[in-house]
Amino acid sequence: MSELNQIALKILENGKGILAADESTGTMTKRLQSVGVESSPENRVLFRETLFSSNCMRECIGGVILYDETIKQKSKTGKNIPDMLLEVGSYPGIKVDTGAKQLAGSKNEKITEGLDSLRERLKEYSKLGAKFTKWRGVYNITKDYPSKLSIYSNAHALARYASLVQENNLVPIVEPEVLMDGEHSADECFSKTSEVLKRCFEELIFHKVDLSGIILKPNMILAGASSKNQISNEDTAKLTVKCLKENVPSEVPGIAFLSGGQTETQATENLNLINKFNDTNFIMSYSYGRALQQSALKYWAKDTKDTNGTQKIFDHRAKMCSLATQGKWSKNLENI
Ligand code: 13P
């Protein structure tokens, strides 16, 4: 078993998943302002270390994706954030893309940037304690999109990224996110996600990426958020498993879904059903941002000194997600 495969498994095995706390300063500012908290470096790290020192970390969170600012910050007690995570058995990870910019040649689509000087940045992050990385490609569904140009160019960037990351002995999270915004049907989401995944793996293989040392972070198969034809959670789970079975090579050890704008309970229920229907060898877990943090952030905003109260909410959410990775979640467990 390769070292990278071992890291990937350690992050996702035994009911663990990933906390995506890698919101850029711009996104984090929006999140904090939405709950009436000033977005200062102190407040950003305070909320994050409140989560990172929570009880659930040891049992439920195998890895945390950090943003450049956070991986260089210290906790209240003067500990480096990566050390704080390693002490509770959770691996520090780092977002290394520099964001999605307009794709030349296609007016309303995006290409993710960040390959320039990536090799040097990876060396720096590795020294700071990072064990894994994240890069997100983003695709929207309309009548004409995602275009072949967006599918091909984002897959190429994801593969170049993943190859450089493995060269530096880090595990790349490969995140091709087909957005849930729009009026499209679940069938369209299925076919577009299939096309996107297929192309990503063609490029990853072409770039000689060791597939046993990556984590795939995909979207679930959902009807567009404004579609009149929503499907049941059971159908989402069945279609999601089918899509991954058809398009992801079996060497990939683990899949960690993004929540993508689903509510906390919806993201948990869907993951639970996915695991009930999972007839593959892939570990199916979570790499949630909003679906792990939303309620905790709202509570924390009312009293940023109430660490225990905030942690209780985060612990509950993480426990629910962890149970969902084993198909052991049920709605009545939510009412505590
Ligand atoms: P959400 O779970 O909020 O979609 O965030 C996950 C993520 O890391 C997106 O890149």
Image (cartoon, grey):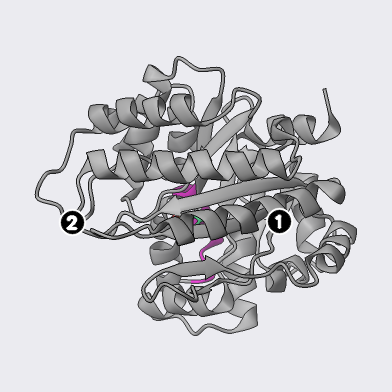
Q: Position of residue 27 (x, y in %)?
A: 49, 74
Residue 329 shows up from this direction: no
The residue at which mark 2 appears reads as 183
Q: Which residues are magenta?
A: 304-314
Q: Position of residue 20 (x, y in %)?
A: 56, 54
From mark 2 to mark 1, how far is it between C-alphas?
Answer: 32 Å
Which residue is found at the position 50% from the left and 32% from the top? 322
The residue at which mark 1 appears reads as 161
Residue 100 shows up from this direction: yes
Disc ID at residue 290: none
Which residue is found at the position 59% from the left and 39% from the top? 201
Residue 1 relative to residue 30: left or right: right
Q: Nearer the viewer, residue 9 or 251?
A: 251
Q: Is mark 1 within 8 Å of ligand 1?
A: no
Q: Position of residue 6 (x, y in %)?
A: 78, 30
Query: Which quarter of the rendering shows the C terminus?
Result: top left
Mark 1 secondary-structure assignment: helix
Which residue is found at the position 15% from the left and 52% from the top? 227
> Dot 2: within a 10 Å radius of its alpha carbon, few (fewer than 14), some, or many (20 or more) residues?
some
Mark 2–mark 1 contact, CB under 8 Å?
A: no
Q: Nearer the viewer, residue 15 or 156?
A: 156
